[in-house]
Image: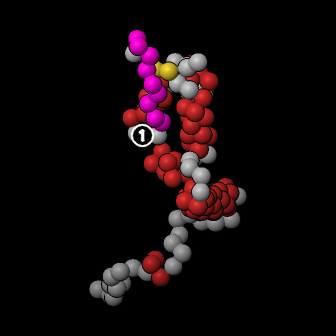
């Protein structure tokens, strides 16, 4: 027995608008319709929707989900690339946190450029009257 859009959205803990959006961007195939025009989602639609939701929760951009949501070498490569991006983001955020902690503890000065030569005046000092 098929499920309605509302039912499949509820089962996947998402909204009807999200399901419609996934149809619009081509991530979720359109189900068959009954004679009255209502969509009838099957188990395969729910499985696909749950997979999309899981990947989104992991931070995978919508435009990369098709690459990742299929089985095979291309999905492995795509997941490795996404993992690398996440690793780089985590490292950047950890550096930022360390700098913030240093500022909070007064062990660094935030206003002084690293190269002290930039503090020298651009114009020579005036000499005498």
Give how far across and how far down residue 41 sits, in percent.
52, 24
Q: Is residue 117 left or right of residue 95?
A: left
Residue under the point 68% across and 65% down: 107
Viewer-closest of 43 and 65: 43
**Is 30 included in the stretch rendered in magenta?**
yes
Give the residue furthest to the left: 129
Residue under the point 35% across and 80% down: 122
In which quadrant of the rendered image does the C terminus lie?
Answer: bottom left
Q: Which residue is mark 1?
A: 26
Q: Secondary structure at mark 1?
A: loop
Viewer-closest of 11 and 107: 11
Residue 100 sits in quarter: bottom right
In which quadrant of the rendered image does the N terminus lie?
Answer: top right
**Is 100 included in the stretch rendered in magenta?**
no
Give how far across and how far down residue 112 sits, in percent.
53, 69
Instruction: Please say if 60 is above or below 110.
Output: above
Residue 45 appears in the figure? yes
Q: Rate crowding at label 1 as few (under 14), some (14 to 19) or many (20 or more) other CA atoms within 10 Å.
A: few
In the image, which residues are magenta?
28-36
Instruction: Please say if 10 is above or below 46.
Output: above
Residue 86 sits in quarter: bottom right
Residue under the point 47% across and 82% down: 117
Residue 96 appears in the figure? no
Secondary structure mostly taken by the magenta-highlighted segment of the chain:
loop
């Amino acid at each position: 027995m098929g499920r309605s859009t509302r039912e499949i959205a509820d089962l996947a803990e998402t909204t009807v608008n999200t399901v419609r959006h996934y149809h619009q961007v081509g991530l979720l195939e359109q189900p068959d319709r009954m004679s009255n025009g209502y969509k009838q989602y099957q188990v395969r639609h729910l499985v696909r929707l749950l997979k999309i939701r899981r990947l989104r929760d992991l931070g995978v951009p919508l435009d990369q989900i098709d690459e990742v949501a299929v089985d095979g070498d291309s999905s492995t490569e795509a997941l490795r690339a996404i993992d690398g991006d996440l690793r780089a983001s985590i490292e950047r955020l950890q550096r930022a946190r360390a700098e913030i902690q240093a500022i909070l503890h007064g062990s660094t000065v935030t206003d002084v450029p690293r190269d002290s030569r930039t503090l020298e005046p651009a114009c020579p000092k005036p000499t005498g009257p």
